Image: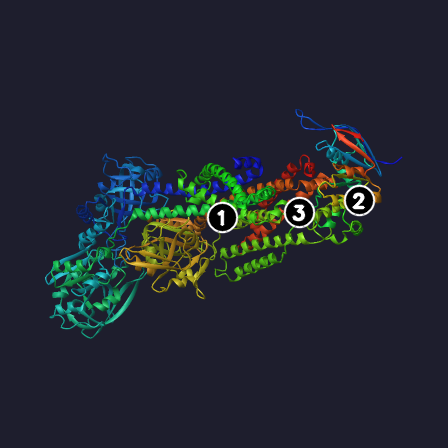
């Protein structure tokens, strides 16, 4: 009851504290609620994307037999569905609308039972598309679409001797169904918020269309109760045939072949004891003197294989020896011990085929019989083995058909791919082993069953990427991470407002306690103990706190509604376009209220403790008695802060232009300025100078130094925030194409739906895509490989622990010194060179600081772990951080390491085009035309960077608005303090009036006191902000740009002080002089 | 005939709004001349302080006229009244009301700052006044370092620094013990005689009132001479 009465009596001063508590609570809960809402929104989207999928087997560039899924399902009784997913393009021919980036899923009926909402009515078989794609293409059920798909192959398209001409499949189909999101139209494994354009075909139809029967590349399961048992079943049920390995019976035993042509090294390692390797290849020509034999098959044979055919060869070949068959010996007119030169293509990291030569000594000449007549030694290279005529060959490399003679054609007709020569297995591997494998067959004396059993014992399902991925759990983690990120961002953004509210609370609560000094002193003198007195005040504050929290909870709804409306519209960039939905979680109410209560009670308890320390005798005296303190200690602190600021600028172990360095220095300067001001107040307080009105103003300012300092800190903080943040805003269109800018000097950035297989800087690449050399003569294209992981930039709210990887040849970037680095391990060399060498077994990677630091919480030296399709785990170390570049969202690594990690991910999906600023439009047009069939989407680099900057700009705008709210709060504080001080000093003003001061001059004096606060706040805030924006070339412009907000701040603050003066000086001051 | 400093004719003053009206002064007339020593006594709430405020121009009257020496009757703007008060009136209160942020001498010199800058001669005069009351060594002290009697002496000196023609003292010894009250009364007598200013004291203390030439009682909101 007493607490209520006391609150009601002191309602004026307490109402400000109440407002402060309510604002702090509302802002805290509201900020947490933005995260809640983002979480709910992402959960909802995840449910639509994944439906009832819990676990997945994702083959990452490999394929698996669909029978494996059936067997596994039967054995485990877990619902499974096998899917073949391919990239493609689609167009609506009637309206000429195209979408360059779609996923085509070959699905069986069981797939639809995984939908979020299962439709019991069986829909018509045939082409189905999701509603988003239907809307985009403006099509309805029954309309026709033209689909272009990548032609998958078990043999990677990057592998040597792979044909180029059948990379795409096109078909025209009618739409049988349009699938809405709830029926699994939104199916998508990636956690991108952008949404996927999906096309669904019956699995068998897609397999037929792409000649991929019976292969699939994804298997999904519903919830599995016993994961361990399921994994055991997986390892028991998989067969070699499921991963494209065939073991066939031969006359002497068995032979292992892979439908991927090249056999993975790890298989070779396991089979080496019981089988002999074969590596067949096509050489461009044999030469002896001026005689040449074009395009012939040659085989490298392991030693035991030579021993197997003793009639032909009693002992193994040396690595520089070759056995040629009689046909070749006749053609080249060579005999034993003569030299034969061979020319062959070697596969480079960037898919270029470079011609190499090697000279061998003819060890012997064999007749075409026995092993030397074995046609199966030639691997079934597509484009070669299946052609009846040599002139139809398309081995994926340049073939000079004119060089093929009639006798070569005759040999092909008679012997097909029978090798014309044999070298040692070691020599063959030295020349033709590649990342896809180092053998094309293994031959064993064991029976197929024996060899198969032996291999099954040594090989494991995970060696082939048959591993369960907890896709739902990972997705939940990614969205939870995203929600945490959003929460932390908005709590951080709003923290300034919260701090401002707490400063206000502290300020007013300390004034309130001051107001109660006399009363407390009387109570003390009446026999109350200090615990009694402070507990009484504390109880009052608890009541006030509860009321404040109630208002805060109501305010949180308003704050959240306003914020989420803005975030769903004007500020949508800040949350990557996600639509916020849902309500505030009860936990957020609890956290926000408890945090506010804890801080308020902490402040309250601290102030009451200080209050208790004052002697009771002092409490009974008039307030505001003067205690003169020396300013020296404050000057020392200011000096230390200043020196630390200089030290931060010069020696902080960060990159020279790292904004954090300047922000730390700026905050220290801000602190130093406040200390100087505090010292100045103390100095003024103790100085015996000439007395005049100016000095009186100074004395009055210093008299309430602590209050004024808190106000100045609040206002200076607002000024600092507004000036500094406006400097970091990147205006759209302000981006240049300098090498040291975020575009790296590249004018265009492209992404293709179907991979670019050849380097388009070279003639073979230009020929393949019908690109004109002349049109591209001034351009250089940097090709980037990419895995399927998610973009980890500000454009994706979900936080993938393994962001997208880009494998590239960085030499051009190094040569051009492209892109600005914020930080790297590089001392003297270019940071790009750090990508070359592994660091203690870790693969070096470079990424943009915005993605790494803000999205993933990673920095220089952080290590990320990736698991690959072959079950291997790779550690990646961040060796360099790019600053504000268009390469956000992924990690850059050397192409060699990328292909080591992902040997089966073929081609390039991202392109950076350097046009050297000449004819950019023409180059863009030419590339778009040439790579149209691959679904190339070219974007102006500056526009791409603008999209990322838009997110930052939105945050800055939010930050500035919060700064403005802070200014409003500070202005309320300023006005309230002016009012409060005038009320406290009414006796003083009444006296001055009695001494002859006019009310105008008194108002002027009071106003000037507070105007100085505003001026000093602006000064300190601007100086600190200038330090913060030192690294920016547009620093001065930014201050000028912030001039209007600064003037507004000044006007608002001065106006609120003026209003307070007017209100407070109204009425009679004389009451203050009465002692009766 | 002595010169008038301030003259009140039929002054009425009430507080409150239209519905609750409380009379404070009713038909009060008073003529204060240079050198007068007047005391006003009366119970609490009788309107003694209001009478002083009306005389000093800090409060307006509802009915009647207040004629102030050196001020045109028509010119009662805040600024003019403030200048008149500053030049002609010295105010002393029951509480000292010294500014805690100013030293003793600065408090004494405070009235000068209202319309001018403090000059050396002002400081010398303030120092001289302090010597007169035996406080020359306390010029640089802070108010909280003084005793209650000392603070009130400084308040008296502050009222006299501009050599006013009228000293208005509102219970000047009300917060002091007997000894200090006596000292302040002596000091007021002495300084008033030195300056020749009119002295109007409002007090409860009959002993202090008895020191004055004329004593008035304010009872039932009306002023009558005893």
Within 10 Å of disc 2 (Cα), the crowding (few <14, some 14-19, many 20+) is some
Q: Nearer the viewer, residue A949 or A943?
A: A949
Q: Which chain does the residue under circle 1 lie in?
A: A
Q: How many marks?
A: 3
Within 10 Å of disc 1 (Cα), the crowding (few <14, some 14-19, many 20+) is few
Q: Position of residue A84 (x, y in %)?
A: 25, 47
Whether residue A775 is visible: no
Within 10 Å of disc 3 (Cα), the crowding (few <14, some 14-19, many 20+) is many
Q: Which chain does the residue under circle 3 lie in?
A: A
User: How far is mark 2 from mark 1, CA to CA?
Assistant: 85 Å
**Tag 3 near tag 2, CB within 8 Å:** no
Residue sitting at the far right: B1
Q: Secondary structure at mark 3?
A: helix
Q: Position of residue A337 (x, y in %)?
A: 20, 75
User: How far is mark 3 from mark 1, CA to CA?
Assistant: 51 Å
Residue under disc 3 on the same chain as residue under disc 1: yes
Q: Nearer the viewer, residue A679 or A1045?
A: A679
Q: Secondary structure at mark 1?
A: loop
Horizontally, residue A390 falls left or right of residue A912, namely left
Q: Which chain does the residue under circle 2 lie in?
A: B
**Tag 2 near tag 1, CB within 8 Å:** no
Horizontally, residue A889 falls left or right of residue A998, namely left
Which numbered circle lies on residue A484?
Answer: none
User: How far is mark 3 from mark 2, CA to CA?
Assistant: 34 Å
Residue picked out by circle 3: A700
Q: Secondary structure at mark 2?
A: helix
Q: Quick one: label 3 or label 1, which is nearer the N terminus?
A: 3
Which numbered circle lies on residue A733?
Answer: 1
Q: Quadrant of the C terminus of chain A?
A: top right
Select label 3 or label 1 by which is in front.
3
Q: Position of residue A897 (x, y in %)?
A: 33, 60
Which numbered circle lies on residue B186?
Answer: 2
């Amino acid at each position: 009851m007493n607490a209520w009465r006391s609150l009601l009596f002191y309602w004026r001063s307490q109402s400000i504290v109440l407002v402060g508590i309510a604002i702090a609570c509302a802002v805290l809960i509201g900020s947490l609620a933005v995260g809640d809402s983002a979480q709910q929104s992402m959960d909802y989207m995840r449910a639509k994307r994944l439906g009832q999928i819990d676990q997945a087997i994702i083959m990452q560039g490999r394929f698996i037999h669909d029978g494996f899924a059936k067997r596994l399902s039967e054995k485990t009784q877990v619902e499974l569905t096998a899917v073949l997913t391919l990239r493609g393009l689609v167009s609506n021919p009637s309206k000429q609308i195209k979408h360059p980036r779609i996923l085509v899923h070959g699905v069986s009926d069981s797939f639809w039972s995984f939908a979020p909402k299962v439709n019991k009515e069986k829909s018509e078989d045939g082409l189905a598309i999701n509603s988003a794609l239907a809307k985009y293409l403006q099509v309805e059920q029954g309309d026709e679409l033209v689909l272009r798909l990548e032609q998958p192959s078990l043999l990677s398209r990057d592998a040597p001797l792979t044909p180029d001409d059948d990379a795409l499949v096109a078909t025209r189909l009618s739409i049988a169904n349009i699938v809405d999101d709830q029926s699994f139209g939104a199916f998508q494994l990636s956690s991108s918020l952008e949404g996927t354009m999906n096309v669904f075909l019956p699995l068998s139809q897609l397999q037929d269309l792409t000649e991929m029967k019976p292969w699939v590349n994804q298997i999904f399961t519903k919830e599995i109760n016993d994961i361990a048992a399921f994994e055991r079943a997986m390892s028991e049920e998989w067969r070699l045939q499921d991963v494209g390995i065939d073991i066939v019976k031969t006359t002497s035993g068995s032979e292992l072949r892979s439908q991927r042509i090249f056999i993975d090294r790890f298989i070779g390692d396991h089979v080496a004891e019981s089988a002999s390797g074969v590596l067949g290849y096509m050489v461009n020509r044999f030469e002896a003197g001026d005689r040449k034999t074009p395009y012939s098959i040659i085989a490298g044979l392991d030693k035991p294989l030579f021993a197997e055919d003793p009639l032909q060869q009693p002992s193994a070949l040396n690595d520089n020896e070759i056995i040629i068959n009689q046909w070749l010996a006749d053609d080249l007119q060579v005999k034993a011990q003569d030299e034969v030169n061979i020319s062959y293509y070697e596969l480079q990291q960037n898919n270029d085929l470079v011609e190499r030569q090697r000279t061998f000594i003819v060890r012997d000449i064999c007749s075409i019989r026995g092993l030397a007549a074995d046609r199966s030694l030639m691997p079934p290279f597509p484009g070669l083995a299946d052609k009846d005529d040599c002139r139809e060959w398309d081995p994926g490399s340049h073939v000079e058909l004119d060089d093929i003679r009639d006798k070569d054609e005759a040999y092909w007709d008679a012997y097909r791919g029978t090798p014309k020569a044999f070298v040692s297995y070691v020599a063959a591997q030295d020349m033709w082993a590649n990342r896809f494998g180092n053998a094309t067959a293994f031959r064993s004396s064991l029976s197929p069953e024996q060899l198969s059993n032996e291999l099954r014992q040594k090989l494991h399902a995970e060696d082939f990427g048959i591993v369960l991925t907890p896709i739902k759990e990972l997705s939940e983690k990614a969205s939870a991470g995203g929600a945490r990120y959003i929460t932390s961002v908005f709590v951080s953004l709003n923290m300034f407002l919260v701090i401002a509210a707490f400063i206000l609370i502290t300020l007013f609560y300390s004034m309130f306690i001051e107001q109660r000094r006399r009363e407390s002193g009387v109570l003390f003198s009446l026999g109350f103990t200090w615990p009694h007195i402070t507990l009484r005040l504390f109880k009052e504050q608890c009541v006030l706190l509860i009321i404040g929290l109630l208002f805060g909870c109501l305010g949180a709804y308003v704050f959240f509604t306003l914020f989420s409306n803005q975030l769903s519209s004007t500020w949508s960039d800040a949350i990557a376009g996600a639509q916020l939905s849902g309500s505030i979680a009860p936990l957020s109410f609890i956290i926000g209220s408890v945090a506010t209560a804890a801080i308020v009670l902490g402040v309250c308890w601290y102030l009451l403790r200080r209050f208790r320390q004052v002697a009771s005798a002092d409490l009974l005296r008039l307030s505001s008695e003067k205690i003169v303190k020396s300013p020296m200690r404050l000057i020392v602190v200011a000096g230390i802060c200043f020196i630390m600021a200089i030290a931060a600028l010069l020696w902080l172990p960060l990159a020279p232009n790292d904004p954090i360095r300047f922000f730390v220095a700026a905050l220290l300067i801000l602190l130093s300025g406040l200390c100087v001001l505090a010292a100045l107040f103390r100095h003024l307080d103790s100085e015996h100078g000439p007395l005049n009105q100016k000095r009186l103003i100074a004395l009055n300012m210093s008299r309430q130094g602590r209050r004024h300092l808190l106000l100045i800190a609040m206002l200076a903080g607002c000024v600092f925030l507004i000036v500094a943040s406006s400097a970091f805003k990147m205006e759209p269109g302000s981006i240049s194409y300098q090498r040291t800018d975020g575009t790296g000097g590249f004018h265009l950035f492209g992404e293709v739906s179907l991979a670019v297989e050849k380097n388009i800087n070279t003639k073979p690449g230009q020929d393949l895509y019908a690109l004109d050399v002349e049109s591209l003569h001034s351009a250089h294209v940097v090709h980037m490989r990419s895995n399927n992981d998610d973009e980890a930039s500000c454009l994706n709210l979900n936080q993938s622990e393994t962001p997208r990887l880009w494998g590239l040849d960085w030499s051009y970037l190094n040569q051009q010194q492209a892109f600005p680095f914020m930080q790297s391990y590089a001392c003297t060399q270019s940071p790009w060179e750090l990508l070359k060498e592994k660091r203690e077994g870790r693969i070096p990677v470079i990424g943009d600081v915005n993605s790494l630091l803000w999205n993933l919480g990673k920095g220089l030296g952080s290590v990320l772990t990736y698991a690959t399709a072959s079950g291997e785990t790779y550690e990646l170390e961040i060796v360099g951080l790019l600053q504000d570049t268009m390469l956000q969202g992924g990690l850059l690594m050397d192409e060699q390491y990328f292909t080591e990690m992902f040997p089966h991910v073929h081609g390039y999906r991202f392109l950076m085009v350097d046009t050297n600023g000449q004819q950019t439009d023409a180059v863009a047009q030419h590339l778009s035309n040439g790579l149209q069939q691959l679904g190339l989407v070219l974007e102006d680099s500056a526009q791409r960077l603008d999209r990322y900057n838009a997110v930052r700009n939105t945050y800055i705008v939010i930050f500035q608005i919060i700064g403005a709210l802070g200014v409003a709060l500070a202005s309320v504080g300023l006005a309230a303090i002016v009012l409060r001080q005038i009320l406290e000093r009414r006796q003083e003003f009444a006296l001055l009036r009695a001494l002859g001061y006019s009310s105008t001059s008194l108002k002027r004096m009071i106003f000037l006191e507070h105007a100085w606060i505003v001026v000093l706040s602006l000064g300190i805030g601007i100086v600190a902000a200038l330090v913060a924006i030192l690294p920016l070339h547009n620093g001065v412009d930014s201050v000028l740009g912030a001039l209007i907000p600064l003037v507004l701040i000044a006007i608002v603050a001065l106006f609120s002080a003026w209003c307070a003066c007017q209100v407070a000086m109204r009425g009679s001051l004389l009451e203050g002089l009465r002692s009766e | 005939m002595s010169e008038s400093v301030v003259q009140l004719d039929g002054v009425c003053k009430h507080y409150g709004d239209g519905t609750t009206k409380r009379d404070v002064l009713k038909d009060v007339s008073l003529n204060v001349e240079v050198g007068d020593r007047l005391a006003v006594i009366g119970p609490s709430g009788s309107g003694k302080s209001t009478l002083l405020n009306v005389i000093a121009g800090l409060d307006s009257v509802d009915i009647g006229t207040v004629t102030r020496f050196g001020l045109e009757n028509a010119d009662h703007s805040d600024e003019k009244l403030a200048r008149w008060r500053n030049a002609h009136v010295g105010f002393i209160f029951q509480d000292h009301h010294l500014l805690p942020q100013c030293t003793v001498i600065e408090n004494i010199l405070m009235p000068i700052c209202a319309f001018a800058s403090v000059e050396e001669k002002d400081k010398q005069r303030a120092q001289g006044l302090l010597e007169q009351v035996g406080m020359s060594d306390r010029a640089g002290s802070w108010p909280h370092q003084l005793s209650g009697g000392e603070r009130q002496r400084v308040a008296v000196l502050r009222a006299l620094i501009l050599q006013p023609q009228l000293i208005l003292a509102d219970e000047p010894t009300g917060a002091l013990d007997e000894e200090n009250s006596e000292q302040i009364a002596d000091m007021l007598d002495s300084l008033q005689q030195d300056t020749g200013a009119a002295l109007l004291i409002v007090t409860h203390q009959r002993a202090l009132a008895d020191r004055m030439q004329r004593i008035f009682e304010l009872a039932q909101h009306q002023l009558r001479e005893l």
